[in-house]
C-alpha cells in the first residue's frame, strides 16, 4: 500500500495552497480532485491586499499579475433617486489608515489563479490526480507512522486505490464527503438564504463607474459591479431570498433575465453585452462547521468549513489563510520542531476568523438586500463622504477586516499574551512598549539591504520557507553592541532555541543558503538604526548573526507614516529607535512575541521560554553551565 | 521575389528591439541572424533605469524581472592601502537628484533579455531565420515601393534567397558587412585600445561588497565587480592596453590566470569560484561610424555604429534606444503620418548620443586603468562621501548620462526650440514657463486614473503604440473649461492635426480601443488638478476628450519631490497648477513641444503649426472657415 505524508481532497484554493506549501517543503502528497479539468473560468475572483502579500511571500504574485488583473482601489455607492440612480459617494477599498503594501483588491478569475498554484505544485513533483474522488477513510492507527487509511476512486468507478497517510485534508468545498462522514454539523448562523446570479462578460455602457467596484441600490433591485481582467465586468444580482414571500431555493434565471434586470437597475444608464464568459445561479446559505478536525489527523478547511455570500470577496482569501495556517503546523510537527499539540491551534485560530467573517457577512448581505427608499436620498451626489446609511457604515467599519489586515489570532501558545506560560519582564505587549500586536501580521517596512544596497520590503525578505522569523531590531549599533553579543553568546548554548534545532548534517555545504544556513526552524534578520554605508557586517555582528549576511538591513528609508522617525521600521514596530528589540514572527507571517533587547542573558532566556512552550522541549536549561 | 517592409540583419539587442516594435505595428519583416542559436549566456548584462522604463512601456519588463535579475543601487569605490585594498566610499548608481521611476541598474545576461524579445516577435508573426547571413544589397529603386534588393544566404552556403524591401537595417555588431559595403568609415575618437577579460560565475568570498557594483584599484591592477542573477558575479579585468610597452591586441588569458589576477587584486580578501558560467577575452577599440545611413533606406544601429569599453554598461542600452528612435520614424513615414524627411533625424539624434557616450567612455576607461598610488590614500574608509579623485568625480558627474536620463536630443523639426519653423507665443521653452525640456523624456508622475481609481504612473499609461502622446494638463476644471472646450472645437476642424489623421474606416468598431479610438497618429490623456471623485468625465470634458475615458487622470497624489504642490504632476512638468498646459510627447517618450492652454484658437493653432512641420502637411489651414 502506497504511503503519503498527506492526502489532499480537492484542488480549489485551500487544497492548492496547502499542497503548494507542503510540496515545496519536501512532503509526499497524494492530491486528487473530482473535476476532470481545473477551473476554466468564473468562480471566485477577488484577492485581498493581505492575500497578495501572502502570494508574494510564496513567490507567486508575479505570475498572478502577469494576467493583468483588474485592481479595485475604491468602491462607489449608488442609491436610487428620481431619475434612477446616482452616486452618493466613494470609499477606499483599503483606506489609508491601514498600512498595506498593496492597498487594492486584485480581480482575476479563479481558473487563472489556480493555474499559478498548479504549475508550482507540479514543479515540485506533485501531480493532481483527476477526476478522482474519496470513497472512505479511517484513522485506524494500524500503522502508527501512517495512521490514516484513505480509499480513492476514479469518478467513473473503474479504478480504486487505497493508500495510507499521516494526514488527510478535505478541501472539497461546501459539499464535503469527509465532513459528512465525520458527522460534523454545519451551524447556520443566519437563517436567511439567498439565490445569487453572477455573470462575467464584456459590456458597453455609459455607466461611469463600470471599472469600479460598485454597490448599486435602485428601486428595481440591487446589484454589485466588479471590474475584471480582460476588460470584463462581473455582476452579482440577487435572484431570491428566503425572506421573499414566494421563496424557492431552486429559483433560477436565464442570462437574458439577469441582463434585463441589470438594465432596469442601472437606469438612466444603458448597458449591453458583447459577450458573456461565465454565468451561474446558485443558492447560498450561511454556515460554519462545528469542528475543523476531530483527531488532528483528518482536517478540513475552506468552503468545507464556512460558506457565506460572495459579496465581500472573502471566500478564496479565507481559504488561502486556512491552508497556510495548517501547512506550517503540520511541517513543524513532522520536522520535530513542535509537539503534536501545535495542531490543536488550527481549529480555534481559523474558526474565530470564520465566525467574524460570517457575522460581518450576515450584516452586510442583509443591508445590501434591503431597499433604500428613494425618498431618503440626499442631493450630495459625487461627494467623497458617502451618506452614512447603515450599509455604508458597515462597509467602512469592515475595511480592515475585509482587506485581511484586521485578522488577528487570539493569544495562545504561539501568540504571546499576558497569560502565556512563558513569563519574563522582557516580553513586550501591545499595552506596553510596542505597536506590534501578537497574532497580527508584521507591519510592513521599507529598509535597505546592506550587502547590495537594494531598497527592499522587510516583511517579504524571508520567503514562505516554513521557518520562524527572528527580527533582531538592533537599534543604534554603538548602544546595542553588548546586548547583541550577549544574545549570540547565549544562543550558542547547545540547548537554546537557536542551537537545539540546528541542521543535523553539519558537514553539508550551506555557503549559498542565505535563509536557512543554520536550521530550518528559524531564519534571522538584523536591522540596524544606521545609514547603510556605516554598517560593516563582519565588524559589527557576532559570527552567528553575520552568517545571515544577506539578511542584514539598514533602517534608513524615510516613511511617510512616521515622518519624524530616524529609523522608520523600528518606529513602525513600536520599538525604541535606540535600543531596538526582538520580534519573533510565525512562519505564516503573524507576530508571535516581542522581546526587549538587553545586555546579559535575559533576552535569550525569554526567547528560550517562549520556544519551550511552542516546541514542547525544555530549551536553554543548560544555561547555568555557561 | 518576396517583398518585405524591412530586412533586419542581426538579432542582438538593436535588431530585436526594432523587430519587436515593427512586428507589433503590423509590418512584414525578414529578420536573419548568422548564429545558429540565440545568445546562451554572458555578453551584455546591464539594463539602465531609462531602459527599464522603455521595456516596461513595451510590456516586456515583467518578463525580464521574472528572471530575478540583480539590482545595482550603489557603486562602491575601493582603492589601494597598505593592507591591500579598502573601500573609500559609495555612491548611488542613480542618485536622488535624478527623478527615476527605477533608480537602479538591472543585471541579467543578454541571452535571457534576448529571449523576452524573441518570444514577443514570434507572437506577432516574425520568425528569426538562422543561421543566415547577408551577401549583398543595393538600393536600385527598380521597384519604387520596394527599392532595396537584399541577397541572403545560409551560412553554410547551401541556400540563397533574394528579396526586395522598403528598408534594410544592419544590427550586425562591430563587424558589419553592410557598413563595409557602404564604405562608411569608423572614426576612432580615442586611439587607445584595450583587451578585456570578463568572467561570469558563482564565487565564495569574504569581500564584503561582492553583491555591489565595485570599481577596485589595487597595486596589483584594477577590476570591476558586477553582481548578477542566480547568485553570480561578473568580473571585468583589463588584460592589456595599447599604452603598455609590450602591447599586443591578441594577448589573451586563461580562466585560471584571470582568477589568480583577481585574487591578487582583492587581497586581503579571499575569493574562489564554485563554477564559471562564461568567460571571454576580447579587444575593444573605441569607434563611431561616420554615417548611420546614406540614403535613408539602408540604416545601421547598435554596435555597428559605435563601440566602446563595456565599463559603463551602455552598449545594449544605446542599442535599445537606437532601435526605438528609428522604429517610430519608419512607422510614421510608412503610415503617411510624416514626410520621408523625418528619417533624416535618425542619424543626428542618435549619433550625438553615441559621441557623448564615447567621450565619457574614453575619460572613464582611462581613469579606471590608471593606477591610484597607495601613498595617495586617505584614512576615511567607509565614509559615504568618497574621496574625490578624478575617477570618482567623473563617475558622479556622469550618473545622469549613464542612467539614460541625461540623454537629450537637440532641437530639430521634432523637438521644438526657439529656432523651430513653428512659431507662436504659446510655445513654452525650458527658459520660459516649464521644467520640461524638449528632447528629454517626460518626467515621471504618479496620478489617479478616474474610471477605476487606480494609482498609476502617468508616463507609462500610453504603451509603445507608435503614436504621439498628447497630454492635456487641464489645471483646475472650473478655470480651464472654456479653453478645453475651445481646443476640442478647433481640433474638430477636419484639417487639424487631430482630425487629419483619423482612421479611414470610420465604421470600424473601436468601442474597446482605449489608446487609439480615433487615430493611430495620436493618443490623448487628460489630467485635471482635482480630487478623483470630483471629476465627472461626461460632464467635464467635450466628447472628443471624453472618448479617451480610460486616459483621464486626477493629479491628486502627493509627491515627495514637490511636497507643497497641490497638483504634483502639473508642478513636476513645470506647468501652472491652475492653468495647465499641453505636452506633446514623441512616440519614443521624448518631449516634442509644450504649449500653453488658452481660450480661443491659439493652442490648437500652435499644435497645428508644430505638426505641420513634422508631417509635411498644411494642417489647420481651413480654420478660417469655422
Image (cartoon, coloured by chain):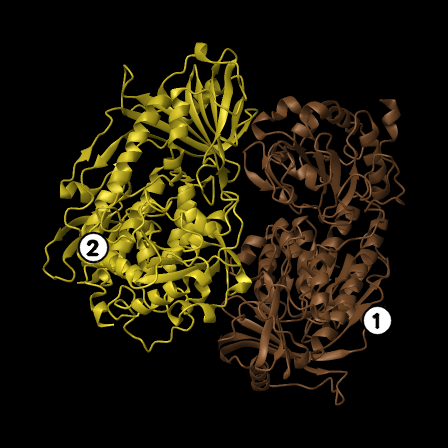
Chain colours: A brown, B yellow
Position of residue B328 measured from the top left corner of the image (x, y, whole percent): 29, 55
Residue A448 lies in what quarter of the image? top right
- Asked which secondary structure carries label 2, the reply is strand
Is residue B591 visible in this depiction of the protein? yes
Q: In this view, does B119 lie above or below B419?
A: below
User: Which chain hosts label 2?
Assistant: B
Q: Name the residue under label 1.
A: A187
* Residue bearing mark 2: B167
Q: Quadrant of the N terminus of chain A?
A: bottom right
Relative to A25, is B114 on the left or the right?
A: left
Q: Viewer-proximal residue, B531 or A285?
A: B531
Q: Are marks 1 and 2 in contact (CB under 8 Å)?
A: no
Could you classify mark 1 by the number of other residues whose Cα lies within 10 Å: few (under 14), some (14-19), or many (20 or more)?
some
Q: Where is residue B333 in the image (x, y as percent from the top left)?
A: 22, 59
Q: Indicate whether B420 appears above or below B369.
A: below
Quadrant of image for the C terminus of chain A: top right
What residue is shown at x 70% (from left), y 46% (from top)?
A: A442
Judged from the image, the secondary structure of the residue bearing numbered disc 1 is: strand
Residue nearer the viewer, A511 or B516: B516
Task: Report the front residue among A101 and B125.
Answer: A101
How crowded is the residue under tag 2: few (<14 C-alpha within 10 Å), some, or many (20+)?
many
Q: Give residue B243's position: percent from left, percent from top.
A: 28, 18
- Res. B441 mark: none
- In the depicted structure, whether residue A430 falls above or below residue A139: above
Q: Where is residue B626 in the image (x, y as percent from the top left)?
A: 25, 72
**Callouts 1 and 2 in the same chain:** no
Amino acid at each position: 500500500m502506497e504511503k503519503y505524508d498527506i492526502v489532499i481532497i480537492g484542488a480549489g484554493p485551500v487544497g492548492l495552497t496547502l499542497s503548494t506549501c507542503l510540496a515545496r517543503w519536501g512532503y509526499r502528497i497524494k492530491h486528487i480532485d473530482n473535476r476532470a479539468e481545473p477551473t476554466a473560468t468564473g468562480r471566485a475572483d477577488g484577492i485581498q491586499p493581505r492575500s497578495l502579500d501572502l502570494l508574494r511571500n510564496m513567490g507567486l504574485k508575479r505570475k498572478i499579475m502577469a494576467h493583468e488583473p483588474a485592481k479595485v482601489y475604491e468602491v462607489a455607492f449608488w442609491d436610487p433617486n428620481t431619475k434612477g440612480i446616482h452616486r452618493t459617494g466613494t470609499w477606499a477599498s483599503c483606506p489609508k489608515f491601514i498600512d498595506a503594501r498593496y492597498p487594492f483588491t486584485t480581480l482575476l478569475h479563479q481558473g487563472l489563479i489556480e493555474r499559478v498554484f498548479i504549475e508550482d505544485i507540479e514543479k515540485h513533483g506533485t501531480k493532481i490526480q483527476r477526476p478522482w474522488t474519496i470513497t472512505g477513510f479511517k484513522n485506524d492507527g494500524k500503522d502508527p507512522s501512517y495512521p490514516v487509511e484513505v480509499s480513492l476512486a476514479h469518478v467513473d468507478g473503474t479504478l480504486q486505490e487505497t493508500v495510507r497517510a499521516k494526514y488527510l485534508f478535505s478541501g472539497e468545498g461546501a459539499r464535503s464527503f469527509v465532513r459528512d462522514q465525520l458527522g460534523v454539523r454545519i451551524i447556520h448562523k443566519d437563517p436567511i438564504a439567498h439565490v445569487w446570479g453572477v455573470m462575467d462578460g464584456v459590456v458597453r455602457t455609459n455607466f461611469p463607474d463600470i471599472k469600479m467596484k460598485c454597490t448599486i441600490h435602485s428601486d428595481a433591485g440591487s446589484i454589485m459591479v466588479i471590474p475584471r481582467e480582460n476588460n470584463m465586468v462581473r455582476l452579482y444580482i440577487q435572484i431570491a431570498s428566503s425572506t421573499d414571500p414566494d421563496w424557492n431555493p431552486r429559483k433560477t434565471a436565464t442570462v437574458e433575465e439577469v441582463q434585463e434586470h441589470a438594465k432596469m437597475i442601472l437606469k438612466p444608464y444603458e448597458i449591453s453585452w458583447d459577450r458573456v464568459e461565465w454565468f451561474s445561479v446558485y443558492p447560498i446559505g450561511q454556515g460554519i462547521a462545528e469542528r475543523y478536525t476531530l483527531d488532528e489527523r483528518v482536517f478540513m478547511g475552506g468552503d468545507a468549513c464556512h460558506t457565506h455570500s460572495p459579496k465581500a470577496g472573502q471566500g478564496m482569501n479565507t481559504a488561502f489563510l486556512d491552508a497556510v495556517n495548517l501547512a506550517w503546523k503540520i511541517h513543524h510537527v513532522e520536522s520535530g520542531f513542535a509537539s503534536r499539540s501545535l495542531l490543536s491551534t488550527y481549529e480555534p485560530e481559523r474558526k474565530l476568523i470564520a465566525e467574524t467573517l460570517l457575522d460581518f457577512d450576515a450584516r452586510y448581505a442583509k443591508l445590501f438586500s434591503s431597499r433604500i427608499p428613494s425618498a431618503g436620498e440626499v442631493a450630495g451626489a459625487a461627494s467623497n463622504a458617502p451618506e452614512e446609511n447603515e450599509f455604508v457604515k458597515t462597509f467602512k467599519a469592515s475595511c480592515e477586516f475585509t482587506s485581511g489586515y484586521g485578522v488577528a489570532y487570539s493569544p495562545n501558545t504561539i501568540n504571546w499574551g499576558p497569560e502565556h506560560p512563558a513569563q519574563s519582564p522582557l516580553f513586550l505587549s501591545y499595552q506596553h512598549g510596542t505597536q506590534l500586536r501578537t497574532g497580527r501580521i508584521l507591519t510592513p517596512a521599507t529598509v535597505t539591504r546592506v550587502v547590495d544596497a537594494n531598497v527592499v520590503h522587510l516583511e517579504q525578505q524571508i520567503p514562505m520557507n516554513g521557518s520562524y522569523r527572528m527580527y533582531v531590531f538592533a537599534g543604534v549599533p554603538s548602544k546595542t553592541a553588548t546586548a547583541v553579543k550577549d544574545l549570540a553568546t547565549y544562543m550558542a548554548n547547545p540547548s537554546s532555541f537557536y542551537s537545539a534545532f540546528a541542521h543535523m548534517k553539519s558537514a553539508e555545504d550551506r555557503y549559498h543558503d542565505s535563509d536557512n544556513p543554520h536550521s530550518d526552524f528559524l531564519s534571522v534578520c538584523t536591522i540596524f538604526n544606521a545609514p547603510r554605508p556605516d554598517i560593516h557586517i563582519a565588524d559589527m555582528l557576532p559570527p552567528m548573526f553575520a552568517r545571515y549576511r544577506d539578511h542584514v538591513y539598514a533602517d534608513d528609508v524615510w516613511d511617510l507614516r512616521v515622518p519624524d522617525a530616524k529609523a522608520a521600521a523600528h518606529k513602525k514596530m513600536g520599538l525604541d529607535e535606540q535600543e531596538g528589540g526582538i520580534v519573533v514572527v510565525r512562519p505564516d507571517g503573524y507576530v508571535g512575541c516581542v522581546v526587549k533587547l538587553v545586555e546579559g542573558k535575559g533576552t535569550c532566556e525569554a526567547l528560550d521560554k517562549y520556544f519551550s512552550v511552542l516546541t514542547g522541549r525544555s530549551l536553554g536549561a543548560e544555561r547555568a553551565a555557561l
